[in-house]
Image (cartoon, helix red, strand yellow):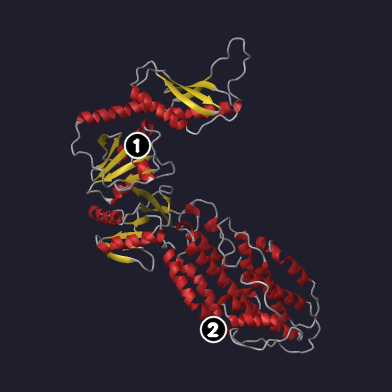
Amino acid sequence: MRPGAATSSTRSAAPALRRAARLGALGLCLALFACRPQSTTAPSDTGPVAWIDADPLKPAEIPAAGASSRAAVARLDRLLDLLDAARFTGDEGAREALWTALGGAAMGRGPEATREAETRLLTEALALDLKPDLDDDARGFLAGAITLLSADLGLVAGSEDLSVRVAAYRNIAEDGHPRAADNARWRLYDHVRGCLAGAAAAVPDRRLEVAVHGLYVREDSLAAWLDDRAVHAQAPWPPPTELWGLLGAERDALAALPRWRGALARRDRDDAVLQDTFLAALPAARDPAWDLQRVPAGTGRKDTLAPVVGISGEDVTVDLGRPGARRSTRGAPELVRAVEAALARDGRGAVLLVAPPLLPSPALNSIFRTLLDARVARIESAVREPRLPEGTGDIVAALPLEVVRPSDHGPAAQVLSRARVRVHLSGRGPRLAVDGGWLDLLPGPSDLDAQLARLDRAYPRERMVTLTLGDDVLYQQLQDLLRALVGGPQRRFDVVAWTPAAAPPPADLPEKSLAEARRRLDVRANLFPRTASAGLVLPAPPPGAPAEPLLPEGDQKRAEALALGFVRCLPELETPLRAGEAVDVELRFEEGRLAGVEPKPPRTRVPAPRLAAFKTCVEDEARGFRLREQQASVRFTVRVRPS
C-alpha cells in the first residue's frame, strides 16, 4: 500500500510516544542498527562523503557496489534518489540506471518492483552501518535511510499504522540528515497527494474525512476531527485550500534543492489537474461570518456538507465558498443551470441554504422557485449553534426540508403521500390539518407547541409532515416552524416535506368543520394518556393438565414488550371508551410466526371502519415479530387499556 493511500477513518493515532513503540516494521532494522560498532576508527580515505548532486533524471557516474565505505554511502544516496525519481516521475532513464546499479532487472513491476528495490537498498544500508570506518556525517545519513526504507516496507492496515509511518517520514524531514530529508519530503508529498486524490474520488459525505488524513504530515493525532464525539465538540474541518497547502509546502521544500526541480516540473501538470479536481470536489468551507440564525445546541441536524446556495439582498451565489462560484441577481435563469450543475457534481440532490433570518418573503419565494426549477430534492436551512466548550465559536447545523413534486413517484414520494399530518404556513402563522381536517390558526409559538404536544398523543405513530407555504412567509417563520417540527434532540417528527403543488386551506373555514376537527383530535388524544397500558392474558391450562406456562420465559418477555406497542393504536378507535374499559386483541401463532390478529369489540360500540383501522395498526406494530422458542400453535390475548 503506497504511503499516500487514504484509509477509512477509524479512531486516530495515539500520542507520539505510543506510536513510536508500535514501529514493529522497524524492529529487525533497529536491532541490527543497535549492533553496529560503538566506536569508530579513523576512515582510511579521510574527508567528507562526496555526495552526488546531479539531477536524478540526468546521467551521473555511480560508485560500484564494492567501492570504499565513503563511496558506498554516496552510491546509496544516489540510488535512493533514482528510486524516488523513477517512482514519482515514471522516468525510464532513472529506472534503468537504478536497476543497472543494483545488478539486474526487477522480478516484478509497479509496487512489487518498488518493494524489491527498497529491500535491496535496505540490505546495502544495513551492511554499510556495520562498517567501522565511517564518520558521524555518513552514519547520520545511514540512520535516516534505514528508518525511511523500513517505514516504506512496513505494512499499513489502518489509520494508526499510517500515522506511525508518516511520523517516521516527518521526523527525518525535520530533524534527519539533509541527504535523507529530501527523500522523506517526497514521501510526505506522496502521502498528502494520495489523501487528496482519495478524497476527490470518495462519496461526497466522506471526502473531508478522507482528506483530513493528510494532516498527519503535521499532526500526531487526528482525534480532534475523527473521534466519535458530538459534532459540537469536534474541531472545525480545515478548509480545502488549507489541505491543498500541505501539498504545496512539501513541493516548496523540495524545490529549494536544485537537483529536484526537474522532477517537480514533471509533476506540475498532474498536480494542477488534481488541484482543480480536489477543490471542485470538496465541500466549501463553512464561513463563520455567514449571517445565520443562532439556535441552542442540538436544535439542528449535522451538516451534510452539501453545495451551498447563499442569498443576501438581491444577490444569489451558487457554490458559495468554492473557486467556481456563480453569482447573479435572484430570479435569473442562469441560477437554475448553476444549481443543476452543483447538484450533478455532488450527486445527492441537496443544497445548504445560507440566508439571513430576516430574509423577506419576496426573496424567499424567488430562491425557492429557483431551487424548485433546478429539481433540488432537499433544502437544508443553515443555522448556527454554539461549539463546545463554550466560547470557542459556532458550528453550522441544518434544518432539513424535503421537496416533493407532483411528478415524483419514487418510494419516498409514495410514503410521504400517505402522511396524515399537514401544515400550511402563511404570514399569519401555521395551520395544521390531520386526516384532511383543518384546525385553528396558531398565531404564536406557545400555541404551536401546545397543539404539537396534543398531536403527539393523538397521532403517536406519525413521523412525517407535509408542508405548504403562503406567498407572505418570512424566512424566520419557516425556520421557527422547522425548529418546532424537526429540531431538537427529541424531535417530534423525522421528516418535513414541502409539497408546492398542494392547495392551501380555504381562506374562511366553517366553524362547524373546525369544531369537528378539534373534537376528533381531543378524542384521539384522550385515548392515549400517559397511563395507557397493555398486558398479556394467557389462557388457563385444561382441567387436570399440569400447570405449565403457556410460553417459555424468553418468548413471554418478548410478547410483553410487543404488547406495549399496541397502546399507540388506541387513538385509531376514535371512540371514547368508558372508564376502565379495555380492548382485547387475540394473537395466533403457527410455528412461531404470527398467523392472525383479531381485535375483540369492546363494550362501547366502535364503528367497524375504526375497529378495522385499529387492527391494521396492530398488524403494523407486530410485523416481523415471531416467537423464538415456542414452535407449537398457540393463542393468547393482549389487553390494551387507555387508563
Horizontal and vertical percent for residue 382? Answer: 37, 54
Q: Is residue 338 left or right of residue 581?
A: left
Whether residue 274 is situated above or below residue 470 in the rendered picture: below
Residue 389 visible from this viewpoint:
no
Question: In which quadrant is the C terminus drawn?
Answer: top left
Whether residue 420 is situated above or below residue 584 in the rendered picture: below
Kind of residue at disc 1: Leu
Kind of residue at disc 2: Gly
Dot 2 crowding, Cα within 10 Å, few <14, some 14–19, many 20+: some
Horizontal and vertical percent for residue 227? Answer: 55, 54
- Of the pair 187 and 405, the residue shown nearer to us: 405
Quarter residue 190 falls in: bottom right
Q: Residue at x 50, y 28 (%)?
A: 594
Q: Secondary structure at mark 1?
A: helix
Q: Residue furthest top?
A: 543
Q: Secondary structure at mark 2?
A: helix
Q: Residue at x 39, y 52 (%)?
A: 398
Q: Alpha-carbon distance for marks 1 and 2?
A: 69 Å
Which residue position is annotated with label 2? 262
Which residue position is annotated with label 1? 452
Dot 1 crowding, Cα within 10 Å, few <14, some 14–19, many 20+: some
Horizontal and vertical percent for residue 519? Answer: 29, 27
- Of the pair 149 and 483, the residue shown nearer to us: 149
Task: Count every numbered label the image shows and give the total.
Answer: 2
Whether residue 300 is situated above or below residue 72 in the rendered picture: above
Asked if the residues shown at circle 1 and circle 2 are in contact, with their CB atoms under 8 angstroms apart, the answer is no
